[in-house]
Amino acid sequence: MLFVMPEPSLDLNPEDNPKSEPQPDVLVLNCSIRTLLGRPRPEELLLVAEVSGAFLGFDLMVRGGLYARAGIAEYWILDLNERRVIVHRRPEGGQYLERWAYLEEEMVSNLGAPEVSIRVGDLF
C-alpha cells in the first residue's frame, strides 16, 4: 500500500536530529499511516520530494546531504525554474551516487513502484 503524506516532518539520522527537522513537501510511504509511530523513519519512505525555486542550491546540497545520510532511498526535486525533476538515488556515505534530471516531456517513476510512471510536465 502506498500513502502520500504532504508536508510532514522526518525522523533523520541521529546526529542530524538535534539540529535539523526538515519538512519535505511530499512523502510517499511504503506502509499504512496507521502503522506509523510518530514521524516517518527512512525505512518507511519510498520517496521524499521538494518543490524548489529560489532555493535549488540549498535543496540539492543541504537537504540532499541530510536525506542521503539518513538513508532515504529516493529524493526528488521539482525544479520550478527549469520545469524538470532531479532524481537522487542510491544514498551512500552521506551523498547520492546517482542523480538524473528528467525534462517536461519525459516519464519518471519511483524505484519502489516502477509500474507507476508520470510525465514530468504533469507534476507542474
Image: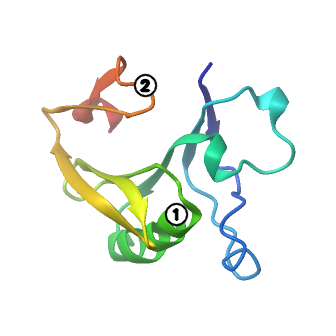
Q: Quadrant of the C terminus?
A: top left
- Location of residue 8 in the rendering, given as x and y in whole percent from the top left corner: 69, 50
- Residue 19: x and y in percent read 71, 82
Which one is earlier in the sequence, the residue at label 2 or at label 1?
1
Judge whether 74 appears above or below 68 on screen.
Answer: above
Element type where label 1 sits in the image: helix
Near-viewer residue (1 or 101): 1
Q: Amino acid at mark 2?
A: Ala
Classed neighbour count for the residue bearing mark 2: other residues with Cα under 10 Å, few (<14), some (14–19), many (≥20): few
* x 69%, y 29%: residue: 31
Q: Secondary structure at mark 2?
A: loop
Question: What kind of residue is marked 1?
Answer: Tyr
Image position of 115 (left or right of 41): left
Q: What residue appears at the point 69 percent right and 69 percent down from the top-left corner?
A: 21
Q: Which mark is residue 113?
A: 2
Q: Residue at x 42, y 65 (%)?
A: 92
Where residue 79 sits: x, y (%)?
A: 30, 55
Instruction: Answer left or right for 13 relative to 67.
Output: right
Asked if the residues shown at circle 2 and circle 1 are in contact, with their CB atoms under 8 angstroms apart, the answer is no
Q: How many marks?
A: 2
Q: Position of residue 38 (x, y in %)?
A: 85, 48
Q: Is residue 66 above or below residue 15?
A: above
Badge 1: residue crowd in 10 Å (few <14, some 14–19, many ≥20): many
CA gap, disc 2 and disc 1:
19 Å
Q: Disc 1 designates what residue?
A: 67
- Who is closer to the viewer here, 83 or 9? 9
**Residue at horizontal 67 percent and vertical 76 percent from the top:** 20
Q: Is residue 3 left or right of residue 25?
A: right
Q: Which mark is residue 102?
A: none
